[in-house]
Image (cartoon, rainbow, N blue to C red):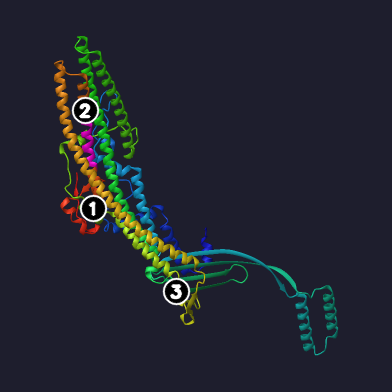
Amino acid sequence: MNLTHKTLFYMTSKRNVSLLLASLLVFYSGCSTTGHRQRADAETYDIITEKSDAVPGAEPDFSIEPSKDFLDLSSLDVLAAADESLGTEIASEAGFAIINLEQAIQLATRQNRSYLNAKESLYLQALSLTLDRHRYTPIFSGGVDAALRRSASDQTAPSVFNEAMTGAGAVIGQLEQITGTEAELLRAYASVVEEAGAAAGLDQPRARLVEERRVTGGTTLGVDKLMRGGGRIAAALTTDFLRFLTGEPRAASGSTLSLALTQPLLRGAGADIAAERLTQAERDALYALRDYTHYRKEFAVNVCAAYYSVLEQRDIVRNNWRGLENFRMNVARERAFSEEGLRTQAELGRMVQAQLDNENRYINAVRRYQEELDSFKIMLGLSTDAQIVLDDGDLARLREQGLDHPAIASEDAVSVALAARLDLYNDRDRVADAERKVRVAANALKPQLDLVAGADVATKGDNSPERLDFNRMDWSAGFDFDPVFDKKAERNAYRAALIDLERAGRQAELAQDTVKLEVRAAWRNLEQARRNYEVALESVRLSERRVEEQQLLAELGEATAQDQVDAQNDLIQSQNNLTSAIISHTIARLGFWRDMGILFIRKDGLWQETPLPQAAKLEERRPADAAEPRDNF
């Protein structure tokens, strides 16, 4: 609305002008979009920080803003030369940035699209809570209205002729008093003129169009407070102003202070009933934080699994290339023996066929490696055109370290999970939510009985707040009662709430059984991964001895083609199995910690594992009292 200074002057008094300008200044100073965003962020982050105290492993200093310590690929070490052990089907990766596991997780937590969506979902849930909390704070409102109004109306005015004849009669009377004689002739003339004027219609009233312009305006300042018990208190100060610009200059203004109170006594009464929306919003924000914290654990395990899967496939390419080279060497040797008549064409053909089969396996391994690497780039939030390679040193260190196998019984792990799993706490707490909603639905079946009170105080004399005349205050107090004869909707809602309670109970039981199932399955997977590793390790040792033996026999001309093919293929397969076994055990261990609920994720996305002596005691603790984690890096 565009208001000129002149209109504002006519609209209200100097006191109200000052109040109005101050209000407008405060309003417009807060209209900056940047300011609104900053205040929303501050309030939302405070809520998340507040609720993080009840969620072990919650991300510290949560923020949806881009990280300032962004990992630039140009700052990473690069591959100095092409890795010839990968064979000829992979283009040279010289100059590509080398990303290790720690850097990969940091990149993923900063750029992965699903991860960022999860963070924003938590933020939006907490943001919605700010509005629910705001409903229970004093809410101020105000308004200004001003208008220039023009109106026109017909007004009837007495005839000028009648006024003249009345004046003539008065003059004749004065002459008679002065002369002492009656002025019959003058009266006769006056009578004739009056009759002639009447005949001509000069004595009739005249109507004229009157235009009127005025400025009207008003200001309103109010405050509304919703109480936790369901009551509502409202107060408003209203000022009206009127000034005529045409005709007789005059102005009028007045102010009124109004107060109103409403307090439910039956339906909707009580903090547990009236504040149900706020209670549920508070709990939903906590649930969202638990879900996000659990998601971070799953995300870290998934990134780690994908990282090692790429390295595993890269190692398979290397093993297949090494095996192919060995086959080519064996074929060359067997061909030389065949030319000397020491080998049959059938044996040579078997060796050549094995070489072709291994060449096909090598090409397929290269294709799978390149596809997995491209998929992993997308997981990191990078373009598939990004020139990166993963650090082979991580796989080498994994082999050097061997197995880190936790010594914990299956049932002990289940006990820890039942005390530490955040998603399980959500399902348990939703049972309490359902019980509370049953009480709310039962309350809605009661009749409506409200205590209502109100008061109005107007100003006396000049228009200023200190002139409010409380001696002439109008007030009222009473009850509003509504028996609510039609309760079909409330009845149905109550019955539905009872069913929801039963469902919530079953869901909590199912969630608990599911956690037990997941933990026991994770424990079995871990045990199986340990056994697979032990078998694969022994298989590699055996295969290496067989290959060495066959090479010696081949050099002496005593090896058969079948034995050489079998030994070489078994070595390649056992090497691949060993790489797969050590990686599978690592991922199974992380998944085991995750399913137990004791895999904690730091700010940078890297994981932490709780030492087992402390983990064994978690079954007796609430999640907020869980043991301090230790770094796994």
Q: Which residue is mark 3?
A: 261
Residue 57 visible in the picture = yes
515 vs 152, nearest the viewer:
515
Query: At 31% from the left edge and 27% from the top edge, which residue is drawn?
Result: 364
Query: At 50% from the left edge and 67% from the top edge, which residue is drawn?
Result: 488
Quarter-of-image position of residue 302: top left
- The numbered mark, 2 or 1, whose residue comes first in the sequence reads 1
Secondary structure under tag 1 reads helix
Q: Assess whether mark 3 and mark 1 are in contact (beta carbons under 8 angstroms).
A: no
Q: Is residue 130 magenta?
A: no
Residue 281 at what x, y percent from top left? 37, 60
Residue 502 drawn above or below residue 445: above
* Circle 1 residues within 10 Å: few <14, some 14–19, many ≥20: many
Callout 3 amino acid: Leu
Report how far apart the C-alphas of labels 2 and 1 lie in the structure.
39 Å
Residue 398 at what x, y percent from top left? 19, 38
| In-image side of 506 versus 169 (left or right) | left
**Which dot marks residue 570?**
2
Residue 404 at what x, y percent from top left? 17, 43
| Magenta span of residues | 571-587
Viewer-nearest of labels 1 and 3? 1
- The numbered mark, 1 or 3, whose residue comes first in the sequence reads 3
Callout 1 amino acid: Val
108 vs 290, nearest the viewer:
290
Callout 2 amino acid: Asp
Q: Which residue is mark 1?
A: 414
Q: Quadrant of the C terminus?
A: top left
